[in-house]
Amino acid sequence: MSLKYVLEGMKNLFGRLLTRQELDSDPTQLPTEVISIPGMVQSGKYVICNRCGTSSLMQSVSLQVSAFFCPACIGLGRVRSDELLYHIPQQPFPKQDTLAWQGTLTPYQAKISHQLVEAVEQKLKILVHAVTGAGKTEMIYDAINTSIASGGAVCIATPRTDVARELYSRLSRDFNLTISLLHADAAPYFRTPLVISTTHQLLRFRNAFDLLVIDEVDAFPFVNNTILHYAADHAQKNSATVIYLTATPTDKLNALVKSGQLTSTTLSRRFHGHPLVVPKPIFSANNKTIYRYIKKQRKTNFPLLIFAPVITWGKAFTATLRQLFPDEQIGFVASTSEDRSDIITQFREASLNILVTTTILERGVTFPKVDVFVLHAHHRLFTTSSLVQISGRVGRSLERPTGLIYFFHQGLTKQMTQAISDIRLMNKLGGF
């Protein structure tokens, strides 16, 4: 069977790794170019999943028939030892210049952008440590365009669905091509040189990408997740360029840089040239103190984003706020919110002026002119990196490069003081 036929009939299999249920075709009628591999392989008392790399004790994952399944990646469809996975090696795309963005990078951004283009040309792995609001997304545009212009396949992967949606919205505007957005509730994949996905969706690719950008590399659930790291390692080609983006690099990434295994570059200034807003800790024995600060903040008419450590507290606080501030338009959004994309849009468009949320919005989203309050900032779920990211929601727009970031607490924690110290350090490195 000719490759031309495969291109027409099976092109969505290029670079993909799919189960029998995910195929659009009868497995018995597949062309010879399709590679099939066992779903799982046996190794002593264990079976190893060929999609996610997880090793499971055979007796714990046995089916009623003489077969085994992988529980680790079952959310993407069950992989079985008696079934196959299907794949066609990735094929080059037509070379094209797709960048439509007409903006201008600052000299600091332009320097890093040039380094990333060189990384693409030299097929390097590089960490970009840039403060929140530095304009990391725009800095990767030339690297993306360089890869696509050479016929390459590009993926921007991020741990959070909301960040993936935000990236899709921005890049759809700034690039002249159709982008495939992949997350649990997204439309089906279609073949395109540019994919934006959650890191979980990388499990459905194999040796596919010439350039893999992992945004918010330190974020849950990607950080310290062996399955998602396996997915990222196997979704990229052997000679791929990998760009890691974060404002809060992990100790592991820093160690790789220190050992020379990973190249790095740092940007300590925001795109608008103003310093990061330093959080102010405020002791609050009860919520009355917080309500007083909210009342004062509402006189400014700037939008207010409030972070709660857990969903139940956030819901209860939202209900109380609606009683105390009946004239305000108040919303709540968390990972469990079915309409969270709509709620986030309402807040961004000022249909809501107060939004209570959880750490789901700690990173990757921009709300111009916003102030941020953190409830129970002493809670164990607010890590140093989380508090740095939350603080980074403030002062991101040129129209208002300042703002309020308050940590309401019942006792300072090491995480709070370290976050404040880290922010001050980045300001010092940025020349402030």
Image: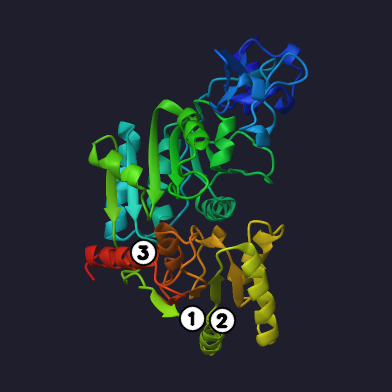
Q: Nearer the viewer, residue 31 or 234?
A: 234
Q: What kind of element bears circle 2?
A: helix
Q: Earlier in the sequence, mark 2 or mark 3?
A: 2
Q: Is residue 393 left or right of residue 105?
A: right
Q: Is residue 317 left or right of residue 283?
A: right
- The reply to whether residue 351 is visible in this rendering is no
The Cα–Cα distance between marks 2 and 1, rounded to whole angstroms, is 7 Å
Three-letter code for the amino acid on which mark 2 is drawn: Asn
Q: Is residue 75 above or below residue 31?
A: below
Give how far across and how far down residue 110 sits, in percent. Answer: 30, 54
Query: Residue at position x 57%, y 32% from top?
Result: 203
Residue matched to label 3: 414
Three-letter code for the amino acid on which mark 1 is drawn: Ser
The Cα–Cα distance between marks 2 and 3, rounded to whole angstroms, is 22 Å
Residue matched to label 1: 284
Q: Dot 3, crowdedness within 10 Å: few (<14), some or many (≥20)? A: few
Residue matched to label 2: 287
Query: Residue at position x 42%, y 65% from top?
Result: 392
| Total marks in image | 3
Three-letter code for the amino acid on which mark 3 is drawn: Lys
Give how far across and how far down residue 378 sits, in percent. Answer: 46, 68
